[in-house]
């Protein structure tokens, strides 16, 4: 299982703030999210035999997922609709607020990725959005997922199951 510990969209939020396109409440929520450290989630994770972990930063969720797959010689199924998103971010992307880094990240990753035909362009750009102080992407065996999730929940940490590791296939990442 792949578990992410924070919502994504900070690159979009920062770009929107620069252009005065985000309301104060959504911006404040995003800043609070960026200020929240991964320390507690990392400490919880250390109690388990995780397969691998990465923090989601400049390469965006898509780029870091690709790096994880390549480094582990596996493929990954990423469930785009399960990825948590900061409030207001999809509306900003709908308005065209897409940072340049997202285009570069997508260009880097797309040759090694398969995107389901039903995947919305804006969702694809969200997955490529470079993050500031993003969450952890944790790969853990399915039988341990319930336990780590219970610990994250008890500690008040956010989490979502966003994918799974599969045997190495033609592409490294399959985005549904």
Image: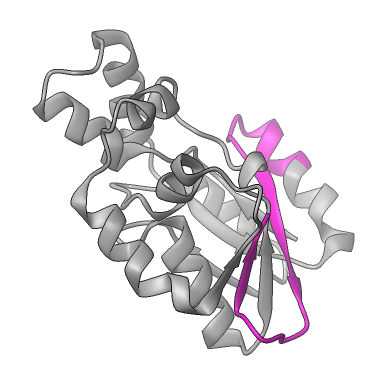
Quadrant showing the C terminus: bottom right
* Left or right: 49, with 39 as reference point: right
- From this viewpoint, which residue is outermost toward the front? 117
The foreground one among 121 and 1 is 121
Quarter containing the N terminus: bottom right
Please name whichever residue, 156 or 18, is drawn nearer the observer in this view of the structure: 18
Q: From the viewer's side, name the closer residue of 36 and 58.
A: 58
Above or below for 48 versus 136: below
Question: In the rendered view, would you say 87 is above or below 60?
Answer: above
Whether residue 46 appears in this view of the structure is no
**Image color mode:** one colour
What residue is at 10 percent from the left and 29 percent from the top?
Answer: 18
**Above or below for 84 versus 79:** above
Q: Quadrant of residue 105?
A: bottom left
Q: From which residue to which does the magenta span run? A: 150-176
Based on the picture, tell me whether residue 162 belongs to the magenta stretch.
yes
Question: Does residue 18 appear in the picture of this structure?
Answer: yes
On screen, residue 102 versus residue 53, left or right, reads left
Q: Position of residue 79 (x, y in %)?
A: 68, 51
Asked if residue 124 is among those painted magenta in the image, a careful observer would answer no
x, y percentage for residue 39? 44, 49
Q: Residue at x 52, y 67 (%)?
A: 65
Query: Where does residue 7 sit, x and y in percent of width and height?
Result: 49, 37
**With respect to residue 152, does 31 lie above or below?**
above
The residue positioned 56% from the left and 36% from the top of the image is 84
Q: Residue at x 34, y 57 (%)?
A: 57
Q: Position of residue 30 (x, y in %)?
A: 33, 27
Count the labels in the image.
0
């Amino acid at each position: 299982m792949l578990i992410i510990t924070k919502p994504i969209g900070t690159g979009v939020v920062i770009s929107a703030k620069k252009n005065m396109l985000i309301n104060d409440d959504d911006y404040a929520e995003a800043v609070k999210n960026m200020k929240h450290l991964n320390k507690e989630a990392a400490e919880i994770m250390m109690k388990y035999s995780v397969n691998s972990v990465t923090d989601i930063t400049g390469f965006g969720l898509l780029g870091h997922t690709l790096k994880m797959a390549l480094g582990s010689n596996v493929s990954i199924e990423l469930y785009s609709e399960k990825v948590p998103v900061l409030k207001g971010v999809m509306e900003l992307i709908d308005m065209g607020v897409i940072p340049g880094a997202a285009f570069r990240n997508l260009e880097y990753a797309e040759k090694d990725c398969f995107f389901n035909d039903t995947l919305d362009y804006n969702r694809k750009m969200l997955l490529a959005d470079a993050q500031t102080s993003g969450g952890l992407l944790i790969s853990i065996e399915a039988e341990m997922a319930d336990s780590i999730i219970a610990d994250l929940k008890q500690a008040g940490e956010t989490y979502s199951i966003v994918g799974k590791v599969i045997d190495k296939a033609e592409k490294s990442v399959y985005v549904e």
